[in-house]
Each structure stands twice: as C-alpha cells, then as structure tokens.
Image: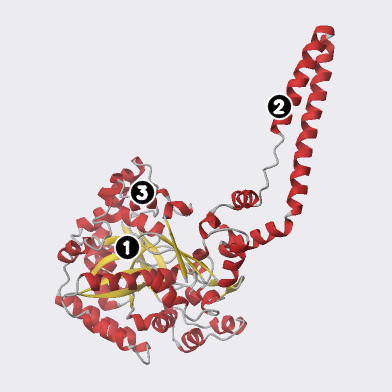
Amino acid sequence: MKITKLDYAATGAFSQTIADYLCRDERLRPFYNRFPTVEAFEAQLKEKSFSDTQRQTLHRALQEQYRSIADINPKVQQNIDLLRQPNTYTITTGHQLNIFTGPLYFIYKIITAINTCTQLQEKYPDYNFVPVYWMATEDHDFAEINHFSLFGKKYVWETEQAGAVGRFTTEGLEKVLDELPEAYPIFEDAYRHSKNLADATRAITHALFGEYGLVSVDGDHAELKKALTPVVEKELTEQLSNRLVEEVNAQLEQLSYKQQVYSREINLFYLQDGLRERMVQEDGLYKVLNTDIRFSREEVLQEAQEHPERFSPNVILRPLYEELILPNLAYIGGGAEVAYWFQLKKLFEAYEVAFPVLMLRNSGLYINRGNASRMHKLGLKPEDMFMDYPELKKHLSDQLHEDEINLEAQREAVAAAFAGVEKLAGEVDPTLVKAVGAEAQKAYNSLQMLEKKIAKARDSKHEQTFKQLENLKEKLFPGGSLQERHDNLLTYQTNNPDFIPALVEAFDPLEFKFTVLEEA
C-alpha cells in the first residue's frame, strides 16, 4: 500500500475554520481548551475528574447494554472493566446510526479514536485509554440514516416508525438485505437478530472493531440520564445554554466564522417511544411541540427528577451530556462537528466540566489497484486528482503537450484592423461607421465560433483519454464530493477484506494530514 499525505488545505475540501484551527490561528484560541498534541494530554489527564461513583454507574450501564452481544470480544470486556479504574480514560467519537454504517467517514472516525488510544498508551503507560463510539440513538432524523450507496446503487430502508431511531425495530431491513448483490454476514446477523437499531448497530461495530477494544455507548439509558438532571432543571428554568451559546456565536461572527448549529431557548426534546419532539415554554407552561403534552413549572421539574430518561439533549447539550457520563479526554469529529464544539466552551465552563481536546477525524482517499493503474497511465499523481475536472482536464492537456485553444491574439488583431477601417470610414462618410461596427461584430463572433470548433476538434483527438479521466474522477470523487462522504465500507471491504486494518495502519490521528491510500 502506497501512502501519500497532503495538507488538508491543499485538498480544497475543508472549511476555512478548520484550516485556521489546524494552523493554530490565534483568533480561535479562546474557543477551545488545548490543541491536540500528544503532550497536551498530560494536562488534560490532570484536569478531567471522574468519580468512582460515576465509573460504577457507567460500568453497570455498559454491562447491561452489552447483554445484546452473545459473545463479547475479550478486549471489549477488558476495556469495559477497566473503566472502573481511576487511571482509565476514554477517547470518544460519535455518529448517527446509519444503516450498514453509512458513508465511510463513520469508519474513519472510529479508527481515529482507536489509533489515538494506541498513541496515548505508548506515551502514558501508567494510564489506560479506551476508544468509545457514542451512538446517536436518540436522534430522530430518520431520512439522514435510512440509506447508503453500494457500487453506485442507493439502498433505502422504508418504515413508518417515528421518534428516536435507536428504539426502532429492524423490521423492513430484511428487504434491504435481500436486495444486496451478495450476503454480508455481519449485517445479516445484526439486522435479522437484533430487537432494535441500537442493538444492531452495537453488534455491527463490535464485529468490525471488537478486536481493537472499541466500546459503544448508548446514552438513552435511565441511569446514565440521571447525571443530566441538574442540567435539565437549569435548562428549563434559566435557559442557560442558549444565553451562553449566543454570546459565543456573536464573538465567532465578529471574526467571520459561521455558526454551525443553532441554539434554542430550551435545548431539549421530550422523549418517549415513537416520540421525540422539542420542548418550548409558552403561556407559563412547558409544552411538547406537536402533542397535547403540557407541564407546569412544578410538574416539569418533578418529571425531570422522576423520569430523566424522558429528556433528550439536542446538539447543544449532547456534548455536555457525553462529558458528564464518560471519563473523556478528547472528542473526535468531522470539520463541521469540531466547528460547532467551538460554540460550547462557555457552557462547559458554566457547569465546571473539563472541555475535551477537539480532534479532527482522519480523512482519506482510497485508490484501488484498477483506479491506480488508470491514474498512472494518464500520467497523474494522487494530489492531481483533487483539482476540479476542468482544471484537471487542462492539466492533462498540458501533459499531452497540447496548448490551450485561445484566439484572443487574433481577436485583438481583427479588432485593431476594424478600428482602422472604422476611422477611415468615418472620415469619408460617418454613416458608414455603424456598418463597419456590424461587420466587426460578425468577425468577432466568427472567431469565437472557430475557437470552439478548433477546441472541439482538438478534444476529439483525445476523447477517449478525457473520458477515462472523467470516469476516474467520478470514481474517486463521486458526485464531486470526497469519497468518504458518499461511498460505503462494503464498496471497498468486499474486494479487500483487509480494508480496515489498512486504514488503521495508515491513519495518524495527531499528524493532521489527509491520507491517500493507493493499492500497489
């Protein structure tokens, strides 16, 4: 496997916010705690406090959740048990419960967490580091998770279920399994034998990453939710998070950074089976939108005490909830995720919770043997492929020693000639000036048309070459976007069973370089 590393900025695929963060731009310094270097974790270890009681609660919840796994990998069980120890900490990433793991970046996030733990274990051998996947089981945006693309075909899960997707039964997924070009045992077993999507996703991540000790955490748990109760109460009575986040948003906007997520007056949902709806305060009551559920102040606070599991944090409060129930040191996310964590630092300070190190997940481009061969036959390098297609086509034309077709010099010469004619005509008969101008425009239009014809004729000479280029560009950047935002794991693992180990070997989580993996 040939590995090429590129600066993220050189890919043109990441925001200015992320480029500035990776360059440690001082303007962003107030919005995070520590920049992710292996040395920075020494101070993070000292700052993060997590009591024995919190550890026992987390351990019990995980033991309960992993009952859905018939045969737990010993490395996973060991990590679950290590979480009871005061010298054990987590490195966390999170993602929605996309069916069949969704786009590749789901896989990339988890591998970044795994490799970060490996590097920290080498640097700090007196501690234990556990990679964690936070399952977004309470998310209710089903349209974002109900599909995936495999070998260019889109597969969609159809169901009428509503509410938190983690609670969905897997009914209907057997139809998707039956449509696939071949059997995929990991997914077959998970979707046919799990009672809900949360259990199925845990089974899948366990099968894919159990040997690396990955622990999947489901925050939709009554005991874990008790840690959020003080936050829920303050959210309902003071709307603290909205005020603090809006203050930070104003600061970011002054620096020309866009806010990634939007805050509400109350950043909570009300959660029941088949229901996850936003909570609002109107006419002195607390209401659950699109329902008849109403609470007085006293009733809603009593509900929070007696049933904390019925309150679900939105994107503003979910990161705080994660850090309340995990002995966590770093959060790993995509560019947009890292950017929205910048909006939250004041919120963490208000609750006196250590703000985690923010890490950009690894990103990559995987070029299989066939595409690598096509690329090299065209005389191109991996870094060339990040150009947009017109620029790449011109680059290839240069490689083919073809000059760009441009008749600008001829247009200027004709324009100069007609200018002389126009001057002469004006001196003889001013009424002829308009006729000269019309002829000049005809000549200009003729040259433009000829330029296009000549370019088309030249292109037709290399039509097959440019078609190969176009097809290669589409395979590596489907729909014009990064491969990782479109393609699914099975697109690559089907033909290369060692796809995940290859990624583990290639990705360096603290190097902050875009990784190109090229099959030799």
Residue on which disc 3 sits: 20
Q: Give the colour scheme shown.
A: secondary structure
Q: Is residue 302 among the parts visible in the rendering?
A: no
Instruction: Check the image and report above or below for 437 versus 113.
Output: above
Residue shown at 47% from the left, 82% from the top: 169
Q: Position of residue 482 (x, y in %)?
A: 51, 61
Camera-near label (2 vs 1) is: 2
Residue shown at 26% from the left, 64% from the top: 232
Q: Amino acid at mark 3?
A: Asp
Residue on which disc 1 sits: 510
Instruction: Check the image and report above or below for 276 versus 245.
Output: below
Upstream in sequence: badge 3 or badge 2: 3
State how far apart marks 1 and 3 are (Cα): 16 Å
Kind of element beneath mark 1: loop
473 left or right of 121 in image? right
Q: Which mark identifies residue 71?
A: none
State how far apart marks 2 and 1 are (Cα): 54 Å
Instruction: Check the image and report above or below for 436 versus 323.
Output: above
Mark 3: few, some, or many residues within 10 Å (few <14, many ≥20)? some
- Say which quarter of the image contains residue 416: top right
Q: Position of residue 261 (x, y in %)?
A: 39, 55
CB of mark 1 within 8 Å of CB of mark 3? no
Residue shown at 68% from the left, 56% from the top: 466
Q: Is residue 415 among the parts visible in the rendering?
A: yes
Q: Which mark identifies residue 412?
A: 2
Which is more toward the observer, 134 or 37?
37
